[in-house]
Image: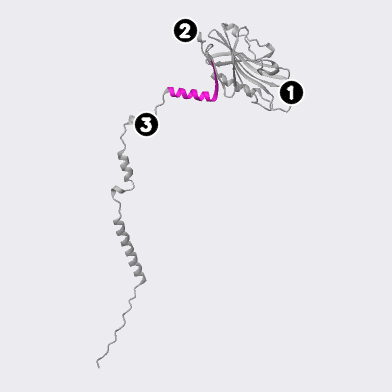
Amino acid sequence: MPETRTASPAKEVKMDPALVALICAGLLYSVSWVMGCSTAPSPNRSSGGKKLAVARQLPQLSPEDANDKLVPTVSGRKLTVEKMAQRAATSLQYSNEEYGVGFDAPKGYVLKTGELPSMDRGLGYLGPIPMHFAETGGIRLATAEPPLGLHLGTNFVNEFFTISALYGSSESACSNFSIPAEARGAAVTRTVDGIEFRGFDEHSAASMHQYSGVYLHAFSNDTCYEIGYGLATAGAETSGNLKRIDPEKVLPRLERILDNVRINPPAFERTDAAN
Protein backbone atom coordinates (compact mmCIF):
# COMPACT_ATOMS: atom_id res chain seq x y z
CA MET A 1 0.00 0.00 0.00
CA PRO A 2 1.42 3.28 -0.96
CA GLU A 3 2.61 5.48 1.90
CA THR A 4 0.34 8.44 2.64
CA ARG A 5 2.12 11.77 3.40
CA THR A 6 0.50 14.39 5.53
CA ALA A 7 1.20 18.13 4.62
CA SER A 8 3.07 19.88 7.32
CA PRO A 9 1.40 23.01 8.69
CA ALA A 10 2.81 26.47 7.59
CA LYS A 11 5.22 28.00 9.95
CA GLU A 12 3.95 31.23 11.65
CA VAL A 13 6.30 34.14 11.11
CA LYS A 14 6.59 36.56 13.99
CA MET A 15 8.10 40.10 13.60
CA ASP A 16 9.46 42.45 16.18
CA PRO A 17 6.91 45.29 16.92
CA ALA A 18 9.69 47.90 16.89
CA LEU A 19 10.65 46.83 13.38
CA VAL A 20 7.01 47.15 12.24
CA ALA A 21 6.87 50.71 13.54
CA LEU A 22 10.02 51.65 11.68
CA ILE A 23 8.72 50.21 8.42
CA CYS A 24 5.40 52.12 8.72
CA ALA A 25 7.18 55.37 9.42
CA GLY A 26 9.39 54.88 6.41
CA LEU A 27 6.41 54.23 4.16
CA LEU A 28 4.59 57.38 5.38
CA TYR A 29 7.69 59.53 4.80
CA SER A 30 8.06 58.15 1.26
CA VAL A 31 4.42 58.89 0.39
CA SER A 32 4.67 62.46 1.77
CA TRP A 33 7.85 63.14 -0.20
CA VAL A 34 6.32 61.90 -3.47
CA MET A 35 3.17 64.04 -3.03
CA GLY A 36 5.19 67.11 -2.11
CA CYS A 37 7.27 66.89 -5.23
CA SER A 38 4.22 66.52 -7.45
CA THR A 39 2.53 69.67 -6.03
CA ALA A 40 5.58 71.94 -5.55
CA PRO A 41 4.68 75.51 -6.69
CA SER A 42 6.41 76.93 -9.67
CA PRO A 43 8.39 80.14 -9.34
CA ASN A 44 5.64 82.06 -11.16
CA ARG A 45 3.00 80.84 -8.68
CA SER A 46 4.73 81.85 -5.47
CA SER A 47 2.73 83.73 -2.88
CA GLY A 48 4.54 86.94 -3.64
CA GLY A 49 4.56 86.52 -7.39
CA LYS A 50 1.32 88.38 -7.99
CA LYS A 51 2.37 91.32 -5.85
CA LEU A 52 5.73 91.48 -7.60
CA ALA A 53 4.05 91.42 -10.99
CA VAL A 54 1.73 94.27 -9.98
CA ALA A 55 4.66 96.26 -8.62
CA ARG A 56 6.49 95.90 -11.92
CA GLN A 57 3.48 97.35 -13.76
CA LEU A 58 3.43 100.61 -11.69
CA PRO A 59 4.76 103.65 -13.58
CA GLN A 60 8.07 105.02 -12.46
CA LEU A 61 7.76 108.57 -11.00
CA SER A 62 10.45 111.17 -10.96
CA PRO A 63 11.37 112.63 -7.51
CA GLU A 64 9.53 115.85 -8.43
CA ASP A 65 6.34 113.98 -9.41
CA ALA A 66 6.51 111.86 -6.27
CA ASN A 67 6.78 114.94 -4.05
CA ASP A 68 3.79 116.54 -5.81
CA LYS A 69 1.66 113.48 -5.20
CA LEU A 70 2.72 112.92 -1.61
CA VAL A 71 2.44 116.57 -0.48
CA PRO A 72 -0.36 118.41 -2.30
CA THR A 73 0.26 122.11 -2.78
CA VAL A 74 -2.09 124.42 -0.80
CA SER A 75 -2.41 127.93 -2.21
CA GLY A 76 -2.20 131.01 -0.01
CA ARG A 77 -5.69 132.04 -1.13
CA LYS A 78 -7.14 128.72 0.05
CA LEU A 79 -5.51 129.14 3.45
CA THR A 80 -6.93 132.67 3.73
CA VAL A 81 -10.43 131.47 2.86
CA GLU A 82 -10.16 128.66 5.42
CA LYS A 83 -9.02 131.06 8.16
CA MET A 84 -11.89 133.45 7.37
CA ALA A 85 -14.38 130.58 7.47
CA GLN A 86 -12.99 129.43 10.81
CA ARG A 87 -13.23 132.95 12.24
CA ALA A 88 -16.81 133.32 10.96
CA ALA A 89 -17.74 130.03 12.65
CA THR A 90 -16.55 131.18 16.07
CA SER A 91 -17.41 134.89 16.10
CA LEU A 92 -19.83 137.61 15.04
CA GLN A 93 -18.13 140.06 12.70
CA TYR A 94 -18.73 143.80 12.47
CA SER A 95 -17.20 146.14 9.89
CA ASN A 96 -17.79 149.82 9.17
CA GLU A 97 -16.07 151.03 5.99
CA GLU A 98 -17.04 154.67 6.55
CA TYR A 99 -14.99 154.89 9.75
CA GLY A 100 -12.61 152.02 8.98
CA VAL A 101 -13.53 150.11 12.15
CA GLY A 102 -14.22 146.42 12.65
CA PHE A 103 -14.18 143.79 15.39
CA ASP A 104 -15.31 140.24 16.11
CA ALA A 105 -17.81 139.76 18.91
CA PRO A 106 -18.19 136.36 20.63
CA LYS A 107 -20.54 134.03 18.78
CA GLY A 108 -24.00 134.01 20.32
CA TYR A 109 -23.87 137.67 21.38
CA VAL A 110 -26.28 140.26 19.99
CA LEU A 111 -24.65 142.84 17.71
CA LYS A 112 -26.39 146.23 17.58
CA THR A 113 -25.22 148.84 15.09
CA GLY A 114 -25.64 152.57 15.54
CA GLU A 115 -27.34 154.23 18.49
CA LEU A 116 -28.87 151.90 21.04
CA PRO A 117 -32.66 151.74 21.30
CA SER A 118 -34.38 153.17 24.36
CA MET A 119 -35.39 149.65 25.42
CA ASP A 120 -31.78 148.46 25.62
CA ARG A 121 -30.90 146.94 29.02
CA GLY A 122 -27.96 149.30 29.36
CA LEU A 123 -26.69 149.45 32.95
CA GLY A 124 -30.05 148.65 34.49
CA TYR A 125 -31.22 151.37 36.86
CA LEU A 126 -27.89 153.17 36.40
CA GLY A 127 -28.91 154.32 32.92
CA PRO A 128 -27.92 153.60 29.30
CA ILE A 129 -24.49 152.44 28.13
CA PRO A 130 -22.53 155.71 28.04
CA MET A 131 -20.26 157.47 25.57
CA HIS A 132 -17.55 159.48 27.30
CA PHE A 133 -16.36 162.00 24.69
CA ALA A 134 -15.66 165.40 26.23
CA GLU A 135 -16.80 167.00 22.95
CA THR A 136 -20.18 166.71 21.28
CA GLY A 137 -20.61 164.93 17.98
CA GLY A 138 -19.56 161.40 18.91
CA ILE A 139 -21.28 158.57 17.02
CA ARG A 140 -21.80 155.09 18.40
CA LEU A 141 -20.81 152.57 15.75
CA ALA A 142 -21.63 149.18 17.27
CA THR A 143 -22.33 147.44 20.58
CA ALA A 144 -22.19 143.75 21.44
CA GLU A 145 -24.30 142.41 24.32
CA PRO A 146 -25.08 138.86 25.50
CA PRO A 147 -28.51 137.37 24.76
CA LEU A 148 -31.26 137.43 27.36
CA GLY A 149 -31.16 134.55 29.79
CA LEU A 150 -27.39 134.01 29.57
CA HIS A 151 -26.88 134.12 33.36
CA LEU A 152 -30.17 132.90 34.81
CA GLY A 153 -30.19 132.47 38.58
CA THR A 154 -27.54 135.16 39.14
CA ASN A 155 -27.45 138.88 39.94
CA PHE A 156 -26.36 139.61 36.36
CA VAL A 157 -27.97 142.63 34.64
CA ASN A 158 -25.92 143.21 31.47
CA GLU A 159 -22.44 143.28 29.97
CA PHE A 160 -21.33 145.15 26.85
CA PHE A 161 -18.54 145.97 24.42
CA THR A 162 -19.03 149.20 22.46
CA ILE A 163 -17.08 151.27 19.91
CA SER A 164 -17.74 154.92 19.02
CA ALA A 165 -15.98 157.55 16.91
CA LEU A 166 -15.74 161.34 16.72
CA TYR A 167 -14.30 162.55 13.42
CA GLY A 168 -12.65 165.99 13.27
CA SER A 169 -11.46 165.90 16.87
CA SER A 170 -7.95 166.79 18.07
CA GLU A 171 -5.42 164.75 20.02
CA SER A 172 -5.68 166.98 23.10
CA ALA A 173 -9.48 166.93 23.12
CA CYS A 174 -9.50 163.17 22.61
CA SER A 175 -7.49 162.66 25.79
CA ASN A 176 -10.38 164.04 27.88
CA PHE A 177 -13.28 161.97 29.25
CA SER A 178 -16.69 162.96 30.53
CA ILE A 179 -16.30 160.55 33.44
CA PRO A 180 -16.96 162.19 36.84
CA ALA A 181 -13.91 162.28 39.08
CA GLU A 182 -15.66 160.23 41.78
CA ALA A 183 -16.36 157.43 39.26
CA ARG A 184 -12.79 157.21 37.88
CA GLY A 185 -10.52 154.43 38.96
CA ALA A 186 -6.98 153.53 37.93
CA ALA A 187 -5.50 154.70 34.63
CA VAL A 188 -5.47 152.04 31.90
CA THR A 189 -3.34 151.70 28.74
CA ARG A 190 -4.00 149.16 25.98
CA THR A 191 -2.55 148.69 22.48
CA VAL A 192 -5.26 147.99 19.90
CA ASP A 193 -4.27 147.22 16.29
CA GLY A 194 -0.95 148.99 16.85
CA ILE A 195 -2.59 152.13 18.30
CA GLU A 196 -2.11 153.09 21.94
CA PHE A 197 -5.39 153.65 23.80
CA ARG A 198 -5.51 155.35 27.19
CA GLY A 199 -8.35 155.61 29.66
CA PHE A 200 -9.71 154.73 33.08
CA ASP A 201 -11.49 152.11 35.11
CA GLU A 202 -14.99 153.27 35.89
CA HIS A 203 -17.16 152.29 38.88
CA SER A 204 -20.56 153.40 40.10
CA ALA A 205 -23.30 152.15 42.40
CA ALA A 206 -26.84 153.44 42.84
CA SER A 207 -30.45 152.30 42.81
CA MET A 208 -29.37 148.90 44.16
CA HIS A 209 -27.19 148.32 41.07
CA GLN A 210 -23.44 148.23 40.59
CA TYR A 211 -21.36 148.89 37.50
CA SER A 212 -17.69 148.21 36.65
CA GLY A 213 -16.18 149.11 33.29
CA VAL A 214 -13.23 150.43 31.30
CA TYR A 215 -13.25 153.30 28.78
CA LEU A 216 -10.37 154.00 26.37
CA HIS A 217 -9.61 156.76 23.84
CA ALA A 218 -7.08 157.00 20.99
CA PHE A 219 -6.56 159.65 18.32
CA SER A 220 -5.73 158.53 14.77
CA ASN A 221 -6.84 159.39 11.22
CA ASP A 222 -8.24 162.74 12.49
CA THR A 223 -10.66 160.67 14.56
CA CYS A 224 -11.08 160.12 18.28
CA TYR A 225 -11.91 156.44 18.77
CA GLU A 226 -13.63 155.28 21.94
CA ILE A 227 -13.82 151.71 23.20
CA GLY A 228 -15.80 150.79 26.30
CA TYR A 229 -16.67 147.52 27.99
CA GLY A 230 -18.26 146.72 31.31
CA LEU A 231 -20.66 144.78 33.51
CA ALA A 232 -23.75 145.77 35.51
CA THR A 233 -25.11 143.66 38.37
CA ALA A 234 -27.83 143.90 40.99
CA GLY A 235 -26.70 144.89 44.47
CA ALA A 236 -26.64 142.63 47.51
CA GLU A 237 -29.94 144.09 48.76
CA THR A 238 -31.88 142.80 45.74
CA SER A 239 -29.91 139.68 44.78
CA GLY A 240 -31.04 137.61 47.78
CA ASN A 241 -29.84 134.02 47.35
CA LEU A 242 -28.88 134.50 43.70
CA LYS A 243 -25.38 133.52 42.63
CA ARG A 244 -23.15 136.58 42.43
CA ILE A 245 -21.22 137.40 39.26
CA ASP A 246 -17.62 138.50 39.84
CA PRO A 247 -16.70 141.50 37.62
CA GLU A 248 -13.02 140.56 37.90
CA LYS A 249 -13.79 137.40 35.91
CA VAL A 250 -16.08 138.98 33.31
CA LEU A 251 -14.01 142.05 32.35
CA PRO A 252 -10.94 140.05 31.17
CA ARG A 253 -13.23 138.04 28.89
CA LEU A 254 -14.62 141.21 27.33
CA GLU A 255 -11.11 142.63 27.02
CA ARG A 256 -10.10 139.74 24.77
CA ILE A 257 -12.26 141.32 22.06
CA LEU A 258 -9.59 144.04 21.83
CA ASP A 259 -7.29 141.49 20.21
CA ASN A 260 -9.33 141.46 17.01
CA VAL A 261 -10.37 145.13 16.73
CA ARG A 262 -9.32 146.57 13.35
CA ILE A 263 -8.81 150.31 12.79
CA ASN A 264 -8.08 151.78 9.34
CA PRO A 265 -8.40 155.28 7.84
CA PRO A 266 -12.00 156.25 7.03
CA ALA A 267 -13.19 155.25 3.56
CA PHE A 268 -13.17 158.77 2.11
CA GLU A 269 -9.59 159.32 3.30
CA ARG A 270 -8.47 156.07 1.66
CA THR A 271 -10.16 157.21 -1.57
CA ASP A 272 -8.47 160.62 -1.49
CA ALA A 273 -5.09 159.02 -0.83
CA ALA A 274 -5.55 156.67 -3.77
CA ASN A 275 -6.46 159.57 -6.10
Please tell me whether mark 2 sits on a helix, a strand or a loop.
Answer: helix
Assess whether mark 1 and mark 2 are in contact (beta carbons under 8 angstroms). no
Please tell me in which quadrant of the rendered image residue 239 appears. top right
- SS of the residue under disc 3: helix
Q: Amino acid at mark 1?
A: Thr
Q: Is residue 261 left or right of residue 42?
A: right
> Mark 3 touching mark 2, by CB under 8 A?
no
- For mark 1, does the 10 Å Cα neighbourhood hold few (<14), some (14 to 19), or many (20 or more) residues? few
Nearer to us in this view, 31 or 107: 107
- Magenta span of residues: 77-95
Mark 3 surroundings within 10 Å by alpha-carbon count, few (fewer than 14), some (14 through 19), many (20 or more): few
- The residue wearing badge 2 is 273
| Nearest to the observer: residue 124 or residue 110 | 110
Residue position for label 1:
238
Asked which secondary structure carries label 1, the reply is helix
Quick one: label 2 or label 1, which is nearer the N terminus? 1
Is the residue marked by circle 2 packed among few (<14), some (14-19), or many (20+) residues within 10 Å? few
Q: Earlier in the sequence, mark 1 or mark 3?
A: 3
